[in-house]
Image (cartoon, rainbow, N blue to C red):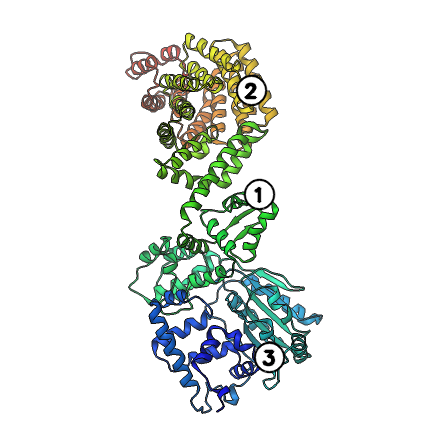
Amino acid sequence: MSDDHIWTAKSIQTLIQRPERLLANQTWRQRLQTFGGLGDFYHWLGQLPLEQPQQSLLKVLTTYPGAPVDSYCQMLNIHQATYHRYQKALFEQLATLLNQPHQAHANDPNSATDRAPIHQLRPAVGDFVGRESEVKRLTNAIEIAHEAKRGAALVGIHGMGGIGKSELSLIVAQNIVHLYPDAQLMLNLYGARDHALTTEQALGLVINALDPKTRLPEKREQLLARYHNILHNKQVLIVVDDARDAEHVRDLIPPVGCCLIISSRQRFSLPAMASVQLEALNTEDSSKLIQEICPRLDQPDTERLASACQYLPLALRVSASILQNNPALKPEDYLAQLADQNQRLQALRDPDDQQLNVEASLALSYTQLSAQQQYFVRQLAVLVADFSSSMGLAMLELPNNLTAENELYYLLRHNLLHYDGHNERWSMHDLIRSFALQQLVKQQEVEAATWRYCETIRDLAQSLHELYLNEIGGKLRARQVFDREEKHVNWVFQYAPTQLGIDRGDQLIIDLVLGTVYNRSNYYPSKVYRIAYINHAIEAATRLNNEPLLARVLGHQANLYREFGKTREAIPIILRSIKLAERHGITDHTSSYIQLAYCHHQLGTPDDLKTGLSYAVAAFLCNNQEAELLRAYNNIPLINSMATIYARLQNADLSLYYYLKVIKIGIDTNIGVDMALHYGNIGNMYRRMDKFDKALEFIKKSAEIAEQYDDGISKAAAAVNLAEILIDQAQYAEALAYFEQAIRLFSQVNYQFHVAYCQWYYGIALLWLDQFEQAIAQFTQSIAHFQQQNTMNQTNLSLFEQLKAGQIEPRQFLAEVMPFT
């Protein structure tokens, strides 16, 4: 045997780890073609009698050629020194076996029966599930193109690593193999590896498969001509796996009569190519695959496992195989590993099969990116939910324009991001995110990325604050934006308190509180949660020794006290806020005066009402009144406060004047569902004036708006108003249904004062209907709620005790009971 035909450890190492170097040589291409190509050569090597360590190493080397040594060590769970020792022993053992004299047998590459196979397709996995619509679409496209005979049938299958592209291509190939009887060839281009096969090498492999003895030309043009010539008037199916991009396979498009099926991790198009973009399996198909592999799992565990794997076929196969092969592993213990971000990818690696490795599959896509693009993937992994282009670009520190947005589209083309065109939202598959977060930790970028995330949400909150206050229709639009970004906001609001005590963390808490003043119901799940946040902000402003910020935060604390019914405690806090502000030369106290006006009119005594009115007037006379009064939302509560105070002072005309002014501003600025409240106020004002027709007109308008926005609180308020009008007109039975509706809706949002109010007047209506026991039950529940909030009218409580004890008649109680306000 001449030297150029002797297998050496070095040549075998090159052929396994850097195959493109030898495939550039015609002699080596022809030599490999005697095995059926590089893929079949790798398969043939796997059949040789090797020792277990060498066999495991060979498997990972041929499955992931060109991967870093660290990755191989991690897959095999060995140190680098051990890896190099195994590698040396493997290549020496292979050289010895390959250089032995050969007898013709089933696995002998020199056997005539195995030379130049032209039916190379392996069967698809037997437990393939789902993809019916994709299979049908691609099969139909090939059949139509084959029948038309205007060009080669060409289909593309695209998707992220582990999504099932290769298996789908084989399923489709099996459906149409009868149309291409001359040959069925399989080419793995290794496009996701560092050392992919070149187009010229792929052309040569096809030529040699059909004519093993031909000498391949060196020039690309001649090679391409030979490719088309050898396929001319033939019906050949070529399945190309793992193409890098369109340029990688453009010259592989065969002549008319042939078919090319391409799979790739990248999205691309070619003329007349029918394409499918594979996404994760649905729940039903995912469960079916899991139970095919691991029948011991019950349906709940199967569904939980599918969800934990995010319905990625490779992850489903790995996880189900691990559970099937290890009966001692409890499903709940394994699911706990998958739920842990730090263990998830380690848990999705089959120790007995190196090809079943989700992390290694994802790493192939990641390593094909430039350093900057890898950085972008890591930063976006911090985001806990789908996101807008503007949020994504903010995380990447890029301007919000179309040029910068191309960076997101580049990651989309590589199937590392998903885009929902209908909702204009980006997302990252959760397993890709897990991989990217690991890389973020390795690059020591976690802290910087997390702070950028916090700052992005802080800026969003502040922009929504301005939108809510200053733009026509801004309130509704701010709520719509918040609904889309709620998961991001919730995450940052939970994270921020963990950073208290450092200047950056203290400032973040203050910024979040000040940026969520008016839109607060969206940001805080409960008033208790909001109290804690405001207290954090007060402590933070104190630590930062920033009295102007402290003054602003105190104002919000006072407002919360007022909402809790602690109105008298709120007033000194507001006055302290004003004093702190004036100490630093701040003289515009519009919002503070509005709050004081609210507080005094809630207290309700004649003196308080007059004091509240004076504060409302003072708000108009602040130094910056013109700029402040242009802020539409601030204008409405100020005027609404004055209207309410005049109503309490029994000045119906001025009250109506200001309420109608609120309606005009609300219409002009499109404040949305809040119009229901203001129409209700006017209806109540007309009701007090005994103008019931006008009252009903405005209250029905209030109910229509509440229904339009499907707002439970507004619907409840409208129901109360309608019930009270019916009571005024002695239509007690008709009022009951409206009270019941209001109680139910207010209970859903935990508005206990309003529930108590409705229960009290529900009891009044029942008492008028002589339903004494039911009325007592409603009064009892109402009093319990009022007493919890220290808002029970003592005169009414005394009257109720006398009524319950039979000391006064129901009609006397009804005549003497005081109205709640």
Name the residue carrying label 1: 400
Circle 3 or circle 2, nearest the eye: 2
The mark nearer the N terminus, 1 or 2, is 1
Q: Which circle, 3 or 1, is nearer the viewer?
A: 1
Marks 3 and 2, how far apart in space?
A: 81 Å
**In the rendered view, would you say 582 is above or below 319?**
above
Where does residue 183 sit, x and y in percent of width and height?
A: 60, 79
Q: Position of residue 216 (x, y in %)?
A: 62, 81
Number of numbered discs visible in the structure rendering: 3
Question: Is 428 in front, or is 797?
Answer: 428
| Marks 3,2: beta carbons within 8 A | no
Report which residue position mark 2 lands on. 629
Mark 3: few/some/many CA within 10 Å (<14, 14-19, 20+) = many
Label 1 to label 2: alpha-carbon separation: 32 Å
Q: Is residue 758 visible?
A: no
Q: Secondary structure at mark 2?
A: helix
Q: Which residue is mark 3?
A: 183
Q: Position of residue 149 (x, y in %)?
A: 70, 72
Place residue 523 in its image quadrant: top left
Mark 3 or 1, nearer chain start: 3
Crowding at mark 1 (Cα within 10 Å: few <14, some 14-19, many 20+):
some
Looking at the rendered structure, the kind of residue marked 3 is Ala
Assess disc 2: are there few (<14), some (14-19) or many (≥20) residues with their C-alpha within 10 Å of its C-alpha.
some
Mark nearest the camera among 1 and 2 is 1
Residue 486 to residue 771: above or below: below
